[in-house]
Structure formats: C-alpha cells, structure tokens
C-alpha cells in the first residue's frame, strides 16, 4: 500500500483560435486558466504529473496490479499553484 496526495493544480494552458481573425482580435487572446484535480504522481523542476483515476486488478502472478488513467503532464513553468485536498490509500 502507498499513499497518494490528492491535489488541485491551477495552471496556464495555450489558447488558440481556428476562425479568421483580424490583428486587433489576435492581440486580445490570452492563455487559459485551467484547474485540474488528481493524484500527485510527480512534482519536480520540469513538470507536475497527476492521474485522475486509479484501478487495481490481479496480475497473472497473483499480485495486485495498480493502473493509473487520465494522466496529465503539466509543464512546471505553467503551474500557478498546487493545493493539497487530501490523501488516498492505493493498494
């Protein structure tokens, strides 16, 4: 068993516009402020990695296999804040 920290990450994402735009409209584009929730998997100088789902299944060897899904890698420089919401025991 291991404990995983549950976090809320606020970060900036790239914005884009697909339609035709005039220059004055382009100048008004801003990065998107995003809020993502998940289990904190990695936090270092380059990135923050969170996973949204965790599941366990028995392996062929009889041990429990832990799988993570909906994993998001956020560039560290894009992170505005990380707030801890709690902890989860992962089997």
Image: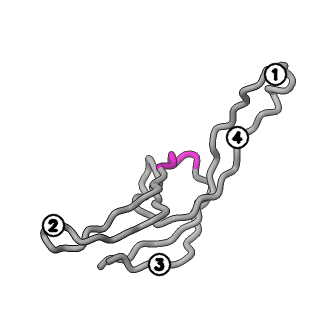
Distance (Cα) linking label 1 and label 3: 46 Å
Q: In the rendered view, tell whether residue 83 sits above or below residue 29.
A: below
Picture coordinates of residue 35, whole percent (x, y): 64, 58
Distance (Cα) linking label 3 and label 2: 29 Å
Q: Is residue 67 left or right of residue 48?
A: left
Distance (Cα) linking label 4 and label 3: 30 Å
**Which marked residue is nearer to the observer: mark 2 or mark 4?**
2
Q: Residue at x 36, y 76 (%)?
A: 90
Q: Earlier in the sequence, mark 4 or mark 3?
A: 4
Q: Earlier in the sequence, mark 1 or mark 2?
A: 1
**Label 2 sits on residue:** 60
Q: In the rendered view, tell whether residue 15 sits above or below residue 51.
A: above
Q: What stretch is highlighted in magenta?
A: 73-78
* Residue 18 location, quadrant: top right
Distance (Cα) linking label 1 and label 4: 17 Å
Tag of residue 89: none
**Label 3 sits on residue:** 87
**Label 4 sits on residue:** 31
Q: Residues within 10 Å of mark 1 (few under 14, many from 20)?
A: few
**Label 1 sits on residue:** 21
């Amino acid at each position: 068993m291991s404990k995983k920290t549950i976090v809320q990450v606020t970060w900036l994402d790239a914005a884009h516009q697909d339609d035709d735009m005039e220059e004055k409209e382009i100048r008004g584009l801003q990065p998107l402020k995003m809020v993502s929730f998940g289990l904190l998997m990695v936090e270092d100088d380059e990135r923050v990695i969170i996973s949204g789902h965790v599941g366990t299944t028995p392996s062929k060897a009889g041990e429990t296999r832990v799988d993570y899904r909906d994993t998001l890698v956020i560039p560290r420089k894009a992170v505005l804040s990380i707030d801890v919401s709690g902890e989860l025991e992962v089997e």
